[in-house]
Amino acid sequence: MTAKLLTIAGSDVSGGAGLEADLKMFEEYGAFGTAVVTCIVTFDPDNEFGHAIDFIEPEVVNRQLGSALAIHEFDAIKSGMLGSVESALVLAEDLKSNELPYVFDPVLVCKGSGSMVDLKDLFVDNLVPLATVITPNLEEAAVLAGLEPIDSVEGMIEAARIIHGQGAKNVVVKGGARLAGEDAIDILFDGETVTTLRSRKVNDKLVNGAGCSFASSIAAGIATGLSITDAVVKAKETVAHGIAASLDNATGVSSLFHPAARTSPSAEVVVTLS
């Protein structure tokens, strides 16, 4: 049986991130994917490729979500940028009624919100408790956990414990290449065990799409029958290969190459657990 996944995310016209990245990752796992579009991200070539976000009206987002859930029986749902507070609340109600595995990439930007902090309570009250896996980066983890900026593995573990206490079943704090040192580090906490995932940083480029691709890979792994730990490990490996083979473009931030683990794997990618 072919696994089916739904992503609720923004469209990034650069192709490396957003729902474009999610759908590519789903296919790499042999899964069928479809998407609810919450916003469109564009770039201005006349202004150093600064980006702009055009949000889709909440009623249209909600209609897309209702349509997708009526058409398909999904094996997992992944969300990224949700577009509006209203859409986030509608998603929460749908998740409560269908109890599907839910991978929550908590992008703390929504229409009408002034800052990431504005969305913290909304997410903690409504979506974090529904998450099978939540995948904040260092900045998002610090905001959700109410901590100072995180710059260490110890800080990542502290944040993971706090966010788990907010109701998420499994917490993956994405340190990636942002921490100092030779390794890209992520933390998985399941409520009992802290697992540290390490892989050697494969290049020093800025790469767009690593975080959302990591989350969508985890969702695809779960939907295709992997355990949480195995899904996280495979996702880290898959994304690391994509970073190693990332594609340069005019923005100055490379685009993740999603099929790299299959088409051009890097011998440098080795994930270790401790």
Image (cartoon, grey):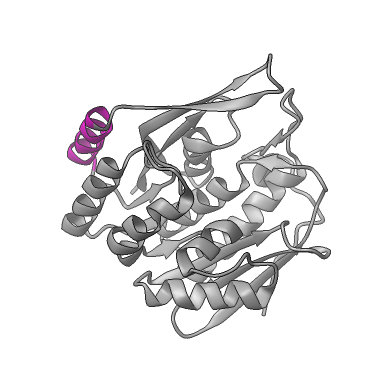
Compared with residue 249, is residue 102 higher up or lower down, i.e. above or below? below
Task: Relative to 49, say whether 233 is above or below.
Answer: below
What residue is drawn where x is 25% and y is 42%? 86
Res. 105 in view: no
- For the record, the magenta segment spans 59-72
Specify whether 155 is left or right of 228.
Answer: right
Check residue 60 for magenta coloring: yes
> At 70% across and 66% down in the image, what residue appears?
271
**Residue 138: quadrant of the picture:** bottom right
In the rendered image, is residue 236 in sight?
A: yes
Residue 181 forms part of the magenta stretch: no
Residue in front for this viewpoint, 269 or 46: 46
Establish if 60 lies above or below 243. above
Is 235 placed left or right of 95 in the picture? right
Q: Is residue 243 left or right of residue 10?
A: right
Spot occupied by residue 117 in the image (x, y as percentages of width and height): 45, 55
Residue at figure coordinates x 53%, y 63% from the top left: 141
| Residue at x 22% of width, y 30% of height | 59
